[in-house]
Amino acid sequence: MNIMKRLGVLLALTGAAIPAGLAVAGDHAYTIGDPTYQTECASCHIAYPPQLLPARSWRALMSGLDKHFGTDASLDPPTAARITAFLEQNAGRDRNGASAPVLRITETRWFAHEHDEVPTRTWKSPKVKSAANCTACHVDGDQGNFSEHGIRIPK
Amino acid sequence: MRTSLLVRAALAVLAVTSAVAARAETPADFLRSFETTARQEQAGFAGFSAARGAAFFNSTHGREWSCASCHTRNPATTGRHAKTDKPITPLAPAANAERFARADKVEKWFRRNCNDVLGRACTSAEKGDVLTYLMSVR
């Protein structure tokens, strides 16, 4: 067995994550690699791409999980620390300057710009329910695929 | 050789991890443990009740959500998160073998969800009633 193969086996055995952050901006495709992030954060909503908020937003969000947008999403400290490190390492650029960190992806200027042609009735549709429900329209959003081709607006 | 040492270290890690994962429990184990603590918490504790658990599960407790808001009134079916609409796998152990199988998950979800539904921790009597109800769902 050559060394690379052994390394592959080692990675598979230990469940080590392939680093995420392989975002291809133009494609709106993101790799969300960390299994702890997936398990813990994708129970109640999809695993939002870490690239969509800057590191200080993730830090602020992760320090208030007991009051997470109206729900208790608290984690044991070691798990929270591990996820925070993953989010920081894969965070996006800070476009918000010195103002308070944005905690909702939907409140970033980037999100508003990307969704400026979505009519109010679509946001209010019972099939969408919440702007947090990416997969209502981005059918493979839970896989990190937000490409134009992957959009199906519910009727 | 260095790589084979690494492989051995990885196998050791795997062995420890699977030993932890193998420490699976059953719904009946949790029920027994809730019963022990309920006896300590409540003088004159007289056992759990599926009917009381069902009523608790389907009612709100001074806040917006009940357990059924996400898990539905039939916990043997797939639920949906009340806010994000994300599907939630069935809660009744008869419908989903992964439920009430790991102490860390049971602790985490009762902690979070009791806080959301009641604004406080659940008592062991409440948890035992709900679990008794969930175990009665076929």
Image (tube, coloured by chain):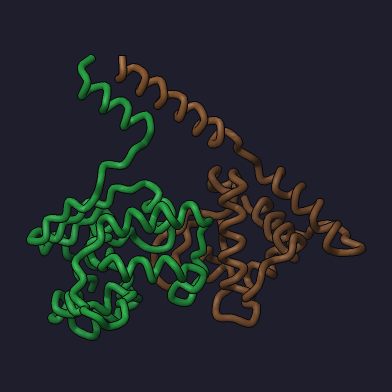
Q: Colour of chain A?
A: green
Left or right: A30, with B44 as reference point: left
User: Could you tell me residue A17's position as x and y percent?
Assistant: 31, 42
Q: Residue at x 24, y 49 (%)?
A: A20
Q: As displayed, is residue A124 above or below residue B67?
A: below
Q: Colour of chain B?
A: brown
Q: As displayed, is residue B16 above or below residue A101?
A: above
Q: Residue at x 55, y 43 (%)?
A: B97
Left or right: B16, with A140 as reference point: right
Residue B4 found in image quarter: top left
User: Could you tell me residue B114's position as x and y percent?
Assistant: 62, 68
Between A61 and B53, the residue placed more toward the observer is A61
Between B101 and B71, the residue placed more toward the observer is B101
Q: Residue at x 26, y 26 (%)?
A: A7
Q: Residue furthest right?
A: B44
User: Could you tell me residue A39's position as x and y percent?
Assistant: 41, 51
User: Could you tell me residue A16's position as x and y percent?
Assistant: 34, 38
